[in-house]
Image (tube, rainbow, N blue to C red):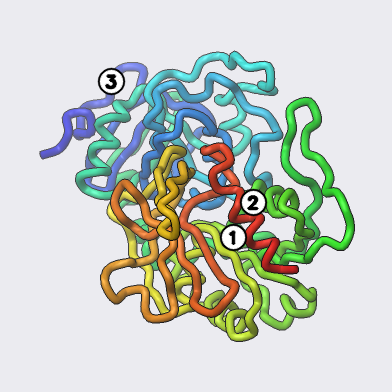
Amino acid sequence: MADPALSHAPQPDGATGVLVLADGSVAWGRGFGAAGAAVGEVCFNTAMTGYQEVMTDPSYAGQVVTFTFPHIGNVGTNPDDMESHDTPGAVGCVVREDVTAPANFRAAGTFQQWMEQQGKIGISGLDTRALTRRIRLSGAPNAVIAHDPKGQFDIPALIERARSWPGLEGMDLARVVTRDGQEAWEGSVWHLGEGFTKPQGTGRPHVVAMDFGAKDNIFRNLVKAGADVTIVPAETSLETILSLKPAGVFLSNGPGDPAATGAYAVPVIQKLLEMDMPVFGICLGHQMLALAAGARTTKMHQGHRGANHPVKRIEDGVVEITSMNHGFAVDNAPGALGDKVIETHVSLFDGSNCGIAVKGKKAFGVQYHPEASPGPQDSFYLFEKFVASLV
């Protein structure tokens, strides 16, 4: 039965935003940010903070984010909290309460204005609990999010647009969000009153990072851990990577289906493994490392997105509090990992795979985001482990 908050109800007075699901369900609200319409998969994120980082994370490309925390936008926005300045992230967001004026000393602008500048569509006033419940029960739906200040919508056309969108399974979005060219990364982590610091010391090991939709804070943490970083586009050849003389290769996070992106990335990763190159993967990079080692990936029912996900480290039973954002996972059903992959971490929410190592290689990956520091320092050891393997 359809949830009353997600039914094809008549448009109420004052409604300037609408979320239209592929099954014909319609939820009305108040639009903010950019005007227009965008299609994507609707997911939910349970984090209480970090909405600007979420909206600029390239891993959210092709998605509409439902924030379960009701008060979004109340600390404003600022240039330092962008995870990417030049690539698309989430196409829009759904929030419960109207966005208020910012109340934070770091705010450089309002969330509404920032959303408009970024070309992203927002809707407030929806029952985000009902929408989240719908996703948990039925899976992440395809939908169109739309905002018109005059409140004029062609609902049948929006329903058809949502139904005709093919969805994220089988979609390679890394090509859409990756950098256009090679880039030498400069700058380390952010400090209050100092901004982003510069890397210290000489003789640092060189890491080549393959950008499948990377968050900038990953590169900052690699630098903090002691590496110099050169970023290359997703489809960079093995020959080009080796010409940069890396001590190790990093595989970034990113959006879309790992099997689709893996069509061109996995053969490169397999060659790196054959050469005994140290490799570290996060999220999409972790999934493609698993594919390269003979495991398989699967589309999740609802995905994991939030900043308080407990992950158990199998080696010693330590639990890390992690930040997550993924709709695909490495399949850890009996026999699915193959004989070359060791499971190193699992989710304490549902037992899904959260980490692997490749037998006999200096290669490992995690399904969560250690650079997001929700612990706040639970997972920085992963960057240190990788950089230590390069010496």
Q: Indicate the quadrant where residue 134 lies.
A: top left
Amino acid identity at mark 2: Ile
Which residue is nearer to you in this view: 78 or 17? 78
User: Residue 317 vs residue 182: left or right?
Assistant: left
Q: Which mark is residue 12?
A: 3
Which residue is at 46% across, 71% downward?
A: 290
Question: Is there any visible trace of residue 119 in the rendered image?
Answer: no
What's the CA distance linking mark 2 and mark 3? Answer: 44 Å
2 or 3: tag closer to the N-terminus: 3
Contact (CB < 8 A) between labels 1 and 2? Answer: yes
User: What is the secondary structure assignment of the residue under circle 3?
Assistant: loop
Say which label, 1 or 2, has the lower sequence index: 2
Q: Nearer the viewer, mark 1 or mark 3?
A: 1
Disc 1 target residue:
252
Distance from Cα at disc 1 to Cα at disc 2: 8 Å
Q: Which amino acid does label 3 sit on?
A: Pro
- Label 1: few (<14), some or many (≥20) within 10 Å? many
Q: Please say if the residues under marks 2 and 3 sit with CB atoms less than 8 Å apart.
A: no
**Screen quadrant of the C terminus:** bottom right
Q: Nearer the viewer, residue 202 or 245?
A: 202
Where is residue 181 shown, x and y percent of the image? 74, 64
Structural distance between the alpha carbons of marks 1 and 3: 44 Å
- The residue pinned by badge 2 equals 218
